[in-house]
Image (cartoon, rainbow, N blue to C red):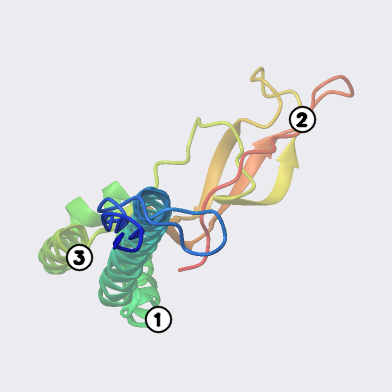
Amino acid sequence: MNEPHKKPIEAETDTAPVNGTAPDGKGHTAADATDNTAATAETAAEQGEGSAGEKVAALEAEVASLKDQLLRTLAETENIRRRAQREREDTAKYAVSSFAKDLVSVADNLRRAVEAVTPEQREQDEALKNLLVGIEATERQLLAAFDRGGIKKMEALGEPFDPNFHQVVFEVENTGKPGGTIVQVLQDGYTIHGRLLREAMVGAAKRGADEAPATSRVDTSA
């Protein structure tokens, strides 16, 4: 009796995908996904570096701006300090201006007392002579005190007229001197620390028609 024909058993084949090559159902493999992840990470890193660089640049600009503002503030503060110091010094220098003007008038009277006596009278009267010696000594002491306090008597005689220092009371013709030259001093002028304290009252040579007046300017705010 013949045995029935048996169908040969086919060997099972392992069809498991090779690692990293299995499709994801959309035609992409795991290797593709890995590459995409790496690219994304690199792009993010580049963007992060760019953003950090911009922040650093912005911070550096802000620091530079703040430094500039600080330097300007320090300079302004120093200017204010110097100005305040100068004002304090000016206040100390010129606070006595009113008192100094009164003392200048005393000096005027001392000088007038000396000049009121002729040389002949002085020699003839011993008592008067001694009195004048005392007055002259007082005048010298007063002028020395003026000098220590920065008060100076102006030497106006023979000088060109200056409207900032001199007040012309009259003009004199045919003096043989250039127009505007001071030919007589009626009252001495004074300055205090270089600033006008009192004008000198003077007589000046008359100017010709072709002579321009003086136009100089000084600080007269004492």
Separation of disc 2 and disc 3 at Cα?
39 Å
Mark 1 residue element: helix
| Mark sitting earlier along the chain (2/1) | 1
Mark 3 residue element: loop
* Residue receiving disc 3: 149
Of badges 2 and 3, nearer the viewer stands 3
Graded by Cα atoms within 10 Å as few (under 14), some (14 to 19) or many (20 or more), the crowding at tag 2 reads few
Tell me what residue is drawn at x 54 percent, y 50 percent: 165
Residue 29: in sight, yes or no? yes
Separation of disc 1 and disc 3 at Cα?
13 Å
* Residue receiving disc 1: 98
Q: Quadrant of residue 127?
A: bottom left
Please give left or right for residue 127 compared with residue 98 in the image. left
Identity, as a three-letter code, of the amino acid under mark 3: Gly
Separation of disc 2 and disc 1 at Cα?
36 Å
Q: Are marks 2 and 3 in contact (CB under 8 Å)?
A: no
Mark 2 residue element: loop
The image's mark for residue 173 is 2
In the image, residue 77 above or below residue 33: below
Residue 116: in sight, yes or no? no
Please give left or right for residue 128 compared with residue 185 in the image. left
| Mark sitting earlier along the chain (1/3) | 1
Please give left or right for residue 107 compared with residue 207 in the image. left
Graded by Cα atoms within 10 Å as few (under 14), some (14 to 19) or many (20 or more), the crowding at tag 3 reads some
Q: Position of residue 216 (x, y in %)?
A: 62, 39
The image's mark for residue 114 is none
